[in-house]
Structures are given as C-alpha cells and as structure tokens.
Amino acid sequence: MKNLHHGLNIYLRNLNAINIASDGNSATMGGGVYGDQVIRYLAANGKVAGSCTCTSLLGPALGGGFNRYQGLHGLLTDNILSLTLVTANGTLTTASPNLNSELFWAMRGAGHNFGIVTSVEYRIFEDQTPTWWVGSFTFAAQESLDTVFAALGKLNNEGEQDRRMTLYTALAVGDDGEVALTVWVYFAGSASDASSYIRLLLALQPRKSSNQSVPYTELADAVGTGTNSPVCGHSGISAATFPIGLREYDIGAIHRVYDLYTELVAQHPDFRASAMQFEAYPMEGVRNVDGYASTAYAHRGDNILISFLALYTPSATNDDIAHVYGTKIRRALLPPGDRLNA
C-alpha cells in the first residue's frame, strides 16, 4: 500500500465468517474472507464456488473474477446475489436485484469504486468433481513459442474450450537458468476425460511432463501457487502484476513479449523470479449470463488473461524497473487501435 497517498487502508480480515443457507444454494460471507478459506470451508460441506486461492473472494469478484469453474458457473461477480456495504457517506446499505438495483449493477464489475463490502450473499454449487487432474508440459521457450501457442489457441478456440478445463502457461527462468515455457492443464475430471488434450500437448514433444490427480482443495499447492508460495507474496520479495485481457493469442506479440522478458532477466538479475502468465479460461458459463445488462463488467469478450508478474528484491529502483517493463509488455500485447488503460 506504499503508493497510496491521501487515502485510507481499511483492514477487513476479521470479517471472515461463512454461513451456508439452509437450502444449500448460497452462503453469506464476511467481506474479508480469503479465497483458500472459502474453498476449504465449502469443500468440507460438499460445495464449491469459484475463488482464487491467495486473494480475498471479493477483490477479484467485484471486478469480474476469472476462475476455474467459470465454464460451468460464470464469473465470480455473476454469483453475487446481494451485498451489504458502507458507502462513501458512511451509510450501511444493501444492494440486490430488488433493492438499490443500480448500485447492485455497478458493484458487480466495478465494485471497488462505490463502497466497502462488509458481507456478501454468494451462490454456491454442489461439488460434483472433488478430484481434478492436473498435468504440466515444459518446453524450451525460444524454439517452442510458435508451436505451443498455436496449440493453445486451438485448445482455447476463442473461448469455446472444454468447460471443465483451464489452461495456465508460464514463461519463466527454470532451475537450470534457462527460460522455459510450461503449460499446466487443470481439468475437472480424470486423465481419461482429458486424454485428447493430453495427446495434443505430448505431440509437441515437451522436454518433461508430469501429471497427478488431487482434491480441488490441494490444486493450487500441487502447482506451486498455494497460499505460502512466492506468487502469493509470502517470500519477502516485492510483487507487481501488469495484466491485459485479449480475445486470442497473437504470435507476433508473443515474440515481442519474449524478447522483453529475456532482456529484463538478463540485464536485471533481481527479476529472475518474474514470469509471464498466460491464462485461458472456458467461456461457456460466462456467455450464458446476460452480463452487459446485469453487471458492470465490460470485458466478457476477453478469452485470455495475460499478465507480467514482476517478482524482485525490494527497492525503489526495482519498483521503477518493474513499472517500465510492465508497461512495455502490456503495450506489446495491445491489439492495433486499442488504447492502454492505466
């Protein structure tokens, strides 16, 4: 929060109660609930809801909220049923489809701008796939960019990818000091269910691959993005993320990003833990929602989320370097004619 000037940082972590409704279709949660807490509490009760392990539930949800269940159940924001919040004038109010409906529309997609949420009524679902299959496929980055991203584009198919599957790809410096490209496939089902996708990636001849089946509660830990991982900011290093949403992969832009990333880690060793993240989500559940009418979220046409995750030794100089490269990378990915938002 060091860049917050003339503002107020309000700590909500103690607002962390979760209560499942008697009909089992929703839960009321405090405004400070953490994603991992939600995942584990609901799983213990045979339920699921989309959530990111190492963020709050509402941080992503108020702005849209990609998640691994969105092919089935939509964005996080689509599953907000009502909110209790404190508005800027100190009024405690409720927003729902029938009460303060315009505020409810705004809170779902642009909610960080209108108040502080103290609790949320949130739609939850029966856990029909408690075990997920996860596979990783690692390639030498430079010679594999074209073939791997062509395959990822085929799998994503402009958001029409299997609604049970999420694709996460990282460009990062490996243990051997070389830049590698690793594709993780998260699949709500068995290896047999995912076999056609596995064969497609194995045909590209990865340098190494692995797979396992794990409970959904352990999925993030299985791929190194659990609550205690560097990605979640618990390693004493600085972290900054520079995201952009796109409709499809542009191979030319991917090469420009590769050049910027390799330049960064070669010239600035403090950034060697940084990574490029390419996330492709199924869009069926998102498109089944009359989203533009019912929420303020404006990016339902984006099928892919690409982020530069800067991880580095804390210093003012490195903060500036992260900002410079984050901006360059976002501009390199921007489609012609589009404008980069801050």
Image (spheres, grey):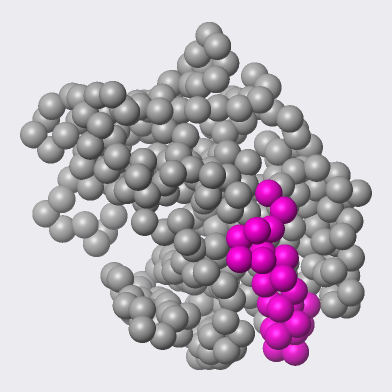
Q: Is residue 239 visible?
A: no
How far across and how far down the image is residue 49, in percent?
Answer: 57, 34
Task: Answer above or below: position of 336 versus 164.
Answer: below
Task: Answer above or below: position of 280 versus 312.
Answer: above
Q: Nearer the viewer, residue 159 or 148?
A: 159
Q: Which residues are magenta?
A: 139-163
Q: Nearer the viewer, residue 259 or 177?
A: 259
Residue drawn where x is 65% and y is 58% of the image: 160
Check the image and name the residue furthest to the top: 22
Check the image and name the residue furthest to the left: 89
Q: Quadrant of the C terminus?
A: bottom left
Is residue 140 on the magenta stretch? yes
Task: Answer above or below: position of 118 versus 143.
Answer: above
Q: In terms of image quadrants, where is residue 275?
A: bottom right
Is residue 2 on the magenta stretch? no
How far across and how far down the image is residue 183, in percent?
Answer: 72, 67
Majority secondary structure in the magenta region: helix
Task: Please indicate whether residue 81 sits to the left or right of residue 152 in the image.
Answer: left
Residue drawn where x is 73% and y is 61% of the image: 184
Task: Please indicate whether residue 66 sits to the left or right of residue 206 in the image.
Answer: left
Q: Quadrant of the N terminus?
A: bottom left
Q: Is residue 127 visible?
A: yes
How far across and how far down the image is residue 26, in percent?
Answer: 50, 21
Residue drawn where x is 52% and y is 16% of the image: 20
Count the numbered circles shown.
0
Task: Please indicate whether residue 179 sits to the left or right of residue 121 in the image.
Answer: right
How far across and how far down the image is residue 14, in percent?
Answer: 37, 27
Task: Answer above or below: position of 258 versus 97.
Answer: below
Q: Nearer the viewer, residue 4 or 306?
A: 306
Residue drawn where x is 75% and y is 49% of the image: 187
